[in-house]
């Protein structure tokens, strides 16, 4: 039995079509750090800071998770060393759902503006002079919802709660510094 060859088999070699730029290939715009916070113990108010000292492989100096006094400190993991959240998400919670969460109430160390954080899972970032690896999303917990007295916060904020990161290279993070995807 004879097999037929496709007429395209003898066609001239194709020229390579350049890769179309998609969301994953487009360069990410840099963001800016709006607010910085730490707290020494669970349930205590987050204290605003002008700068944070990030210790590689450990956490943020003075913060509850470095001290081992955070709500989830009994389940240590590298991705709990520093947390980030978008300021735009806090605005969205208010405008779309009527939920007011002030930057210090969201229990994240770094509040950014101008950079979409969710697509950065699995990537390295520069947060000021500090290089971090984004491990996973930082979903809110029922504990936070109860602490703030905000019913439905858990559901509304679930996929926009920010990022959990490991500190690869320590340094200083200052309000006004840039956040850049590497």
Image (tube, rainbow, N blue to C red):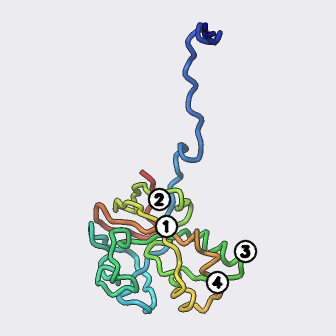
Mark 1 or mark 2, earlier in chain: 2
**What residue sits right under mark 3 in the picture?**
96
| Residue 74 x/y as whole percent | 33, 83
Residue at mark 1 to residue at mark 2: CA–CA distance: 7 Å
Q: Nearer the viewer, residue 53 or 92?
A: 92
**Quadrant of residue 92 within the rendered picture:** bottom right
Q: Which type of secondary structure does the marked residue at label 1 adopt?
A: strand
Which residue corresponds to the image point at 51% horizontal and 67% vertical from the top-left?
Answer: 112
Is residue 58 left or right of 50 when viewed as pictured?
A: left
Count residues near mark 4 (Cα–Cα under 10 Å), then give few for <14, some for 14-19, many for 20+. some
| Residue 108 x/y as whole percent | 46, 77
- Residue 137's disc is 1
Answer whether labels 1 and 4 touch (C-beta < 8 Å).
no
Mark 3 or mark 1, earlier in chain: 3
**Quadrant of residue 81 within the rendered picture:** bottom left
Count residues near mark 2 (Cα–Cα under 10 Å), then give few for <14, some for 14-19, many for 20+. some
Please state which of the two labelled residues, at mark 3 or mark 1, is closer to the viewer: 1
Residue at mark 2 to residue at mark 3: CA–CA distance: 25 Å
Mark 1 or mark 4, earlier in chain: 4
Which residue corresponds to the image point at 55% horizontal and 44% vertical from the top-left?
Answer: 26
Residue at mark 2 to residue at mark 4: CA–CA distance: 26 Å
Count residues near mark 3 (Cα–Cα under 10 Å), then give few for <14, some for 14-19, many for 20+. few
Residue at mark 3 to residue at mark 1: CA–CA distance: 21 Å
- Residue 121's disc is 2
**What residue sits right under mark 4 in the picture?**
100
Q: Is residue 114 above or below residue 144?
A: above
| Residue 175 x/y as whole percent | 44, 70
Mark 2 or mark 4, earlier in chain: 4
């Amino acid at each position: 039995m004879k097999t037929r060859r496709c007429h395209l088999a003898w066609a001239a070699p194709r020229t390579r079509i350049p890769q179309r730029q998609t969301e994953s290939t487009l360069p990410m715009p840099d963001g800016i750090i709006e607010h910085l916070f730490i707290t020494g113990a669970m349930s205590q108010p987050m204290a605003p800071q002008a700068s944070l000292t990030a210790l590689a492989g450990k956490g943020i100096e003075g913060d509850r998770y470095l001290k081992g006094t955070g709500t989830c400190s009994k389940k240590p993991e590298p991705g709990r060393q520093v947390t980030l959240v978008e300021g735009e998400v806090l605005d969205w919670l208010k405008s779309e759902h009527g939920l007011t969460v002030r930057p210090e109430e969201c229990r994240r160390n770094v509040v950014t503006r101008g950079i979409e954080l969710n697509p950065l899972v699995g990537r390295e970032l520069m947060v000021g002079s500090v290089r971090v690896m984004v491990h996973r999303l930082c979903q809110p917990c029922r504990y936070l919802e109860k602490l703030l007295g905000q019913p439905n916060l858990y559901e509304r904020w679930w996929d926009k709660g920010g990022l959990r990161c490991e500190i690869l290279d320590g340094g200083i993070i200052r309000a006004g510094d840039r956040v850049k995807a590497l």
